[in-house]
Image (tube, grey):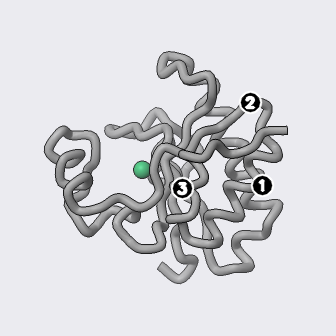
Amino acid sequence: MWTWSQASQTELESCHPALQQVLHQALLLSPFDLRILEGHRDENTQTALFRAGRSQLRWPHSKHNSMPSRAVDIIPLPLDWANTFAFHVMCGVMYAAAARIDLTAQGWRLRTGQDWNGNWRNTDQSFHDAPHFELIALED
Ligand SMILES: [Zn+2]
């Protein structure tokens, strides 16, 4: 059974309660440990990431910029960016976690940077953001 590190816990606490529920459930389901890199992102960090081309959005348009954060970046441990399989497994775990806590009953669905348009394909993307998950309001 995995538990969040203190660093992950701090980021977790900046996330929307519904997203926190998904993350807790995901950690229970995950075959490997997970780390939360970032929940809420402040203006300076968002601007730096945008300028570096690592975010597509300017402050305050990222879902990381809301408080509590509607977006989270997570990674599989041990981290190996070249091992895309672990990121795909992690994605499956997150969607299973969302289903298990009945996220839609709370008015949300999950979207990932591995599949921005939600068509269950990753071959039609120009910008891959494998660690990224966010809440989309069902009425949006
Ligand atoms: Zn992100």
Query: At 82% from the left edge and 60% from the top edge, which residue is drawn?
Result: 100
Q: Residue at x 53, y 83 (%)?
A: 139
Q: 114 and 71: which one is in front?
A: 71
Disc 1 from disc 2: Cα separation? 13 Å
Report the Cα–Cα distance between label 1 and label 3. Answer: 17 Å
Q: Residues within 10 Å of mark 2 (few under 14, many from 20)?
A: some
Q: Could you tell me residue 64's position as x and y percent?
A: 39, 61
Circle 2: element type:
loop
Residue position for label 2: 32
In which quadrant of the rendered view does residue 127 lie?
top left
Where is residue 87? Give x, y as percent: 59, 32
Q: Earlier in the sequence, mark 1 or mark 2?
A: 1
- Residue kind at label 3, given as amino acid type: Thr
Is disc 1 placed on a helix, strand or loop? helix
Comes first in the chain, label 3 or label 2:
3
Label 3 sits on a secondary structure element that is helix
Amino acid type, callout 2? Phe
**What residue is shown with label 1?**
25
Asked if disc 1 and disc 2 are in contact, CB closer than 8 Å, the reply is no
Q: Identify the residue under disc 3.
A: 10
